[in-house]
Image (tube, grey):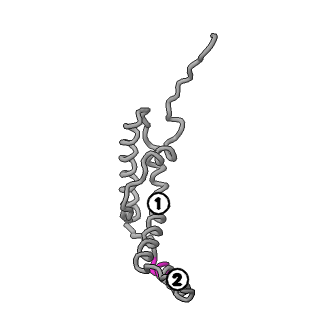
Amino acid sequence: MTTYMLVTSMEKQVLFKRLSQRNAIRREIGIRPMNFPALFKRRLRMTTERRYIELLEPYLVAAFGSVEWPAVPALRILLAVTQHGVAIDSLYRDIGVVDPREKQPDMISMIERLVPTSTTKTTVVSIGKD
């Protein structure tokens, strides 16, 4: 298993330098300086999560496309949570990256985005003369 760095030390240095420059400009023009440690930590977390989601996306597509989706919304959400866990486990086994996200993603939007539309069961009802 190979380990994968979501954010390299060079990228952290670039982020640190960019935020330092922005803070220096704020000081020069008389604006209150940023809360540097909190901003650095937040930007680093956002970058890490974005990269993780980019790596996870193909695993999600494969996991969500490999099952038959039920028509009942509650079962779809339960299956989506299960398949999301399968994708996370597969990514960890392949690359060795642990999920850095603090919150669970929105499963409804994930279902709308990733579930193949051919699995939705629609019934056409004819209203009128036959």
Q: Amino acid at mark 2?
A: Ile
Alpha-carbon neighbours of circle 1 within 10 Å: few (<14), some, or many (≥20)? some
Q: How many marks?
A: 2
Dot 1: element: helix
Residue ranking furthest to the front = 30
* Magenta range: 8-12
Main SS, magenta residues: helix
Residue ranking furthest to the bottom = 28
Q: Which mark is residue 94?
A: none
Q: Amino acid at mark 1?
A: Ile
Q: Is residue 16 above or below residue 79?
A: below
Q: Which residue is mark 1?
A: 53
Q: Which mark is residue 31?
A: 2
Residue shown at 46% from the left, 67% from the top: 46
Find out whether the residues at labels 1 and 2 contact each other: C-beta distance under 8 Å: no
| Residue 42, x across and y down, in percent | 43, 71
Residue shown at 46% from the left, 77% from the top: 8
Q: Is residue 62 above or below residue 36?
A: above
| Residue 51, x across and y down, in percent | 48, 65
